[in-house]
Image (cartoon, grey):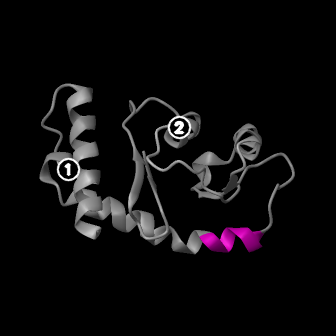
Amino acid sequence: MLMVDGQGLPLSAFTTAANHAEVSSIETLLDVRICEQMPERLLYDKAADADWLREHLADRDSELICQHRKGRKKKPTQDNRKARRLQRRWIVERTIAWLQNFRRLVVRYENHAHLFEGFVQLACVMILLKRF
């Protein structure tokens, strides 16, 4: 999982197992960020469409902006005006492409998860140093 700022610089990154739901890891992503202030808005894809997550982030003074799932049974909690911000999702995809430039992350050579996460953190630091 990866959190970036408006310019695509990584603010938080960590790895989870493939069988864990992304929506339950978003709060952990916010807890391990490198900046002190909480982001005002969090843009995400349809996987984060959960009312309990929206309430938890609202308690932390952050707003979750994501599209609603197609089969949503409850009333929508946001209109499409805020969803226009999702057009800037390409910035996140570009940062993921920057991480893919590190061969060790594309093909996972490490057998241990903590070693792979260390290389992810190292790649994020290298991206940050290159941009400053």
Q: Residue at x 20, y 50 (%)?
A: 106
**Where is residue 131 shown, x and y percent of the image?**
28, 69
Q: Which residue is mark 1?
A: 106
68 up-or-down from 109: above or below? below
Q: Secondary structure at mark 1?
A: helix
Give the distance between the C-alpha atoms of the residues marked 1 and 2, in whole angstroms: 26 Å
**Where is residue 9 shown, x and y percent of the image?**
38, 62
Q: Secondary structure at mark 2?
A: helix
Residue 55: in magenta span: no
Q: Residue at x 14, y 46 (%)?
A: 104
Q: Mark 1, residues whose alpha carbon is within 10 Å: few (<14), some, or many (≥20)?
A: few
Identified by mark 1, the residue type is Val
In this view, the residue in front, 26 or 68, is 26
Quarter of the image holding residue 53? top right
- How many labels were placed on the picture? 2
Q: Residue furthest right?
A: 75
Asked if residue 41 lies left or right of residue 17, the reply is right
Q: Quadrant of the C terminus?
A: bottom left
Q: Mark 2, residues whose alpha carbon is within 10 Å: few (<14), some, or many (≥20)?
A: few
131 up-or-down from 61: above or below? below
**Which label is found at residue 31?**
2
In this view, the residue in front, 12 or 18, is 12
User: Is label 1 in contact with label 2 (beta carbons under 8 Å)?
Assistant: no
Magenta segment? 80-85
Identified by mark 2, the residue type is Asp
Q: Quadrant of the N terminus?
A: top left
**Where is residue 5 shown, x and y percent of the image?**
48, 62
Asked if residue 88 lies left or right of residue 131, the reply is right
Q: Earlier in the sequence, mark 1 or mark 2?
A: 2
Quarter of the image holding residue 17? top left
Asked if residue 100 lies left or right of residue 28, the reply is left
